[in-house]
Amino acid sequence: MLLVPGLDALRPDQLMPDARTVDGEGDLLLAFAADSPVVRAATRAQADELAAVLEITDVAPVSVPHRIRGRAWVSGWLTRVPGAAEPGRTTLRLEVGEAYVDDLWGAESVEADEFTAAVPDPLSEHEAELLQHLHAAHSTEVQTLRSLLGERTGGGAAAVPVGVDRFGLRVRFTGVNCFDARFDFPEPVRDVGELRRAMHALFEAANS
């Protein structure tokens, strides 16, 4: 959701871009309907004087208690990008000033140059389908990971995979106590093939 001063009365759906991406300069490109109030506000703004904040909510793609995995806020200055959009759409540029992330991995501010230098995790495009597959087809194996935690989980805790990236797998154990445990891979994976091997190694360790 794009938060823009003076547009607080709009419905949430009017503040949600149809698409978003990051360009080579590290700025966010946001697509809105051409007649959107957000587009009108950016068009009226002079130069880069319209401050805005993009609020992003990350929801786990599997059914689990407390599905929100984190939130991020990217603040900067909003301008209209001439031309670059599909018919009926207008592209807005959010020049990043700073960002703040509060998620399962902790809370931290991110400077603009750090944001620009960041690269996507190689599993990010496939994470949702990977987690859904693990949950649906390999729930028994995921349950065995409790053995790597000793007595911490208790006997009745269910285990649901809620996050995976090149560094490891995060599993939520639910029961009397609900908590997350992270299982790091021996080394970062570069693709889905390497992820499969890393997961097999985890399951073998849990069963040894």
Image (cartoon, rainbow, N blue to C red):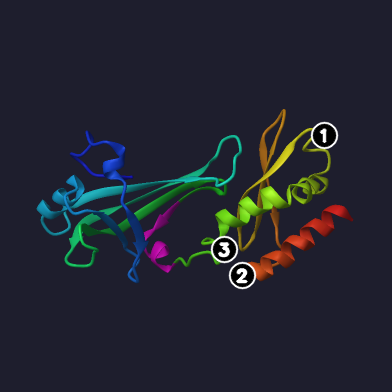
Where residue 60 sits: x, y (%)? 55, 45
| Nearer-N-terminus badge (3/1) | 3
Magenta part of the chain: 109-117
| Nearer-N-terminus badge (3/2) | 3
* Residue matched to label 2: 191
Q: Is residue 177 above or below residue 184?
A: above
Mark 3–mark 2 Cα distance, whole angstroms, equals: 7 Å
Where residue 169 sits: x, y (%)? 66, 54
Q: Main secondary structure of the magenta part?
A: helix
Q: Are marks 2 and 1 in contact (CB under 8 Å)?
A: no
Would you identify the image quadrant in which residue 160 lies?
top right
Q: Amino acid at mark 3?
A: Leu
Q: Amino acid at mark 1?
A: Gly
Residue depicted at x 65% and y 54%: 133
Residue depicted at x 31% and y 46%: 16
**Quadrant of the image for the C terminus?**
bottom right
Where residue 14 sits: x, y (%)? 26, 42
Mark 3–mark 1 Cα distance, whole angstroms, equals: 32 Å
Q: Is residue 149 above or below residue 175?
A: below
Query: Which of 35/28 is in front?
Result: 35
Would you identify the image quadrant in which residue 146 lies?
top right
* Residue matched to label 3: 123
Query: In the shown orientation, is residue 205 left or right of residue 68?
Result: right
| Nearer-N-terminus badge (2/1) | 1
